[in-house]
Image (cartoon, rainbow, N blue to C red):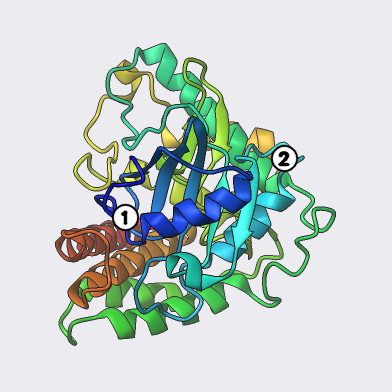
Amino acid sequence: MSAQAAARAPGADFDIEALRGFLTGFLGRAVQDLAVVPTTGGMSNPTYFVTADGWRAVLRKQPGMKLAKSAHAIDREFRVMGALGDSAVPVPQLLHYEEDASLLGTPFYLMEWLDGRVFTEYSLPGMAPEQRGAIYGAMARTMAAIHSLDFQAAGLGDFGRPGNYFQRQISRWSQLWQQYRKGDDDNPDLDRMLGWLGGRIPDSELLSLCHGDCRIGNLMFHPTEPRVIGVLDWELSTLGHPLVDVAFNTQAWHMAPDENGGLLGLDLAAEGIPTEADYLEGYYSEAGTTERMTDFHRVFAMFRAAVGSAGVAWRGEQGNSTLPDSASVGRRLAAAYARRGMEIAARSGL
């Protein structure tokens, strides 16, 4: 994009010329050709590929709209990725954090542009069966590396709050659900799921760094090898119970292909995809944990995903979304997560 181009590139929510001015100072040279291309797939913090006369980076910022308290916390993203820079958890190299909102309308940060593959569907279409199995193994090992991290040594000892993680989370997300719901009869499965969870909160002392949205779409794989080169989107990261991350990561085994790319109905053996039980055993072996995931963790993950999807819809209905179809997509996914959660609860022995 030349210096004479329009100030706002297609899909960008900030003044491109303001970014040009910032990069001129940051790079120490005038920027002639500047290209800004939004990424696809996310519904939270806008993310852009930036090219400036051959120099490349990824820019991630808060959305330019009214924000809920503690939402879109890119400062937490930047902090946790910085702490992981020399760890076994692969993350992009961080380049700069800018808290001055007057530059691009919100705080933002720059990070390394990784060349790799991002998969949005757990079925991994187009791959050979043996390739799929290797991808799943890499995903389990990466999740185990996150949970095995010595978060105290990494400087993240204050990255979460003390007390029972599940009680805090259920309280927080139930309050959000009251904010997002359209009425008393909106998504009754979600209300039933909340009631089911309230009487089954486990007493567990497990604590680890948790990604918060540890799904396959937030992992970048090597261009040709079954190896994770970057864990992305740390917005929901905190110190918490690692089996919640695991439950989020394994939701696909309980969802249909049109429900966020799930696996239900597929011939897993023919596709080279492990069963949930086999996948979990691989994770347990890598993480070295003796505590096992239960249907409580599965239902809890569905509950939080349902509320999060309702939040996406609510922001779309309020006009506070960068995606034109966020309202309909969010409501559809909220209903799907709630329905699947209640199916797990109904067959649970808990």
Q: Which mark is residue 12?
A: 1
Vertical position of residue 26 compared to residue 66: above or below? above
| Rendered residue at 21%/61% (across/down) | 326
Lateral position of residue 218 relative to residue 123, left or right: right
| Rendered residue at 27%/67% (across/down) | 321
Q: Nearer the viewer, mark 2 or mark 1?
A: 1
**Residue bearing mark 2:** 288
What is the CA distance from the residue labelled 2 to the residue labelled 1? 44 Å
Earlier residue among tags 2 and 1: 1
SS at mark 1 in the image = loop
Q: 191 and 135: which one is in front?
A: 135
Q: 203 and 41: which one is in front?
A: 41
Picture coordinates of residue 336 (x, y %)? 22, 58
Q: Amino acid at mark 2?
A: Gly
Picture coordinates of residue 6 (x, y %)? 26, 52
Quarter of the rendering occupied by the N terminus? top left
| Rendered residue at 27%/40% (across/down) | 261
Vertical position of residue 321 compared to residue 56: above or below? below
Q: Amino acid at mark 1?
A: Ala
Lateral position of residue 346 relative to residue 274, left or right: left
Residue located farthest toward the right when viewing the structure as drawn: 153
Q: Residues within 10 Å of mark 2 (few under 14, many from 20)?
A: few
